[in-house]
Amino acid sequence: MKIEHLQNTQKDNGKARLRAEYPRKAHEQWIYFLPAEIQDAVIANMDIRHYKRTETVYAHHSPTNEIYTVLEGCIKLTNTTLSGKDIAITTLPRGCTFGELSFIDGQPRQNIAVASTDCTLAVLTRKQYLSLSQQHPEILAGMLQFTAHRLRALVNIHQDTTSLELPQQLAKRLLFIAQKQNDGNHHSQPTEISVSQDELAATLGVSRQHVNKALKKWQTDGLLEVGYRKITLLDCEGLKEVTEDI
């Protein structure tokens, strides 16, 4: 009985932490598009899960049963080439949902999700999602809005790769990560983001040397500071001017 009581207490504490810490205002998490009372219902059905750095959240072609939102840390999404090389797709900080496409259509995962730092995730199962959707039909519309939001972001990224030079693309990417990490607000300074130069290079499809060259120039100009697997943005307005300098 004591063990059962302890387990129930730990579960209650986890739910309380979820209610308190879930990044409701972050645009990159899927329940952002739901009314507050329905957000409460969804969060009440989520569980907290912890992952150590380099631990795999899900593998390529693995079954799809869950959708995830980052509460702490960063997740890296990668793909594996035919030669066996891992290619980074993107890095997702606090406030980002991932795994939604396979979660929606039930198809196997098309990428690999790995913890790039120690991570805490909010997890919702497909069974819980379907049950909640029957009780609250607005959830389906909210997920549709979120999916459209993600698709629009992908279109913008594609347009950037064809119309912007590397410095503009890199500056936009840094500001985008900062905005996601800070629940939609990157104006507080300094702003530290957890991302490596290798990850930035892979995301933009360029060499690490090209990324390093741009970052060093901006560090000299006082726009940012480069650290180990992190970058501190010192002048977000200055970086925004870079994105507009075409």
Image (cartoon, grey):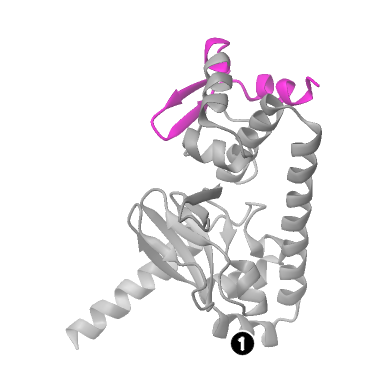
> Is residue 190 in view?
no
Is 130 left, or right, of 17 in this rendering?
right
The C terminus: image quadrant: top right
Query: Furthest residue to the top?
Result: 220
Q: Give how far across and how far down residue 162 sits, in percent.
A: 79, 37
Residue at disc 1, secondary structure: helix
Residue at image point 52% right, 77% down: 45
Q: Give how far across and how far down residue 111 sits, in percent.
A: 54, 62
Is 102 left, or right, of 240 in this rendering?
left
Q: Tell me the quarter of the picture where residue 101 sits.
A: bottom right
Residue closest to the eye, 208 or 117? 208
Is 31 left, or right, of 116 in this rendering?
right
Residue closest to the eye, 10 or 200? 200
Which residues lie in the magenta part? 218-246
Residue 233: say if magenta: yes
Q: Give how far across and how far down residue 134 sits, in percent.
A: 69, 87
The residue type indicated by label 1 comes to Ser
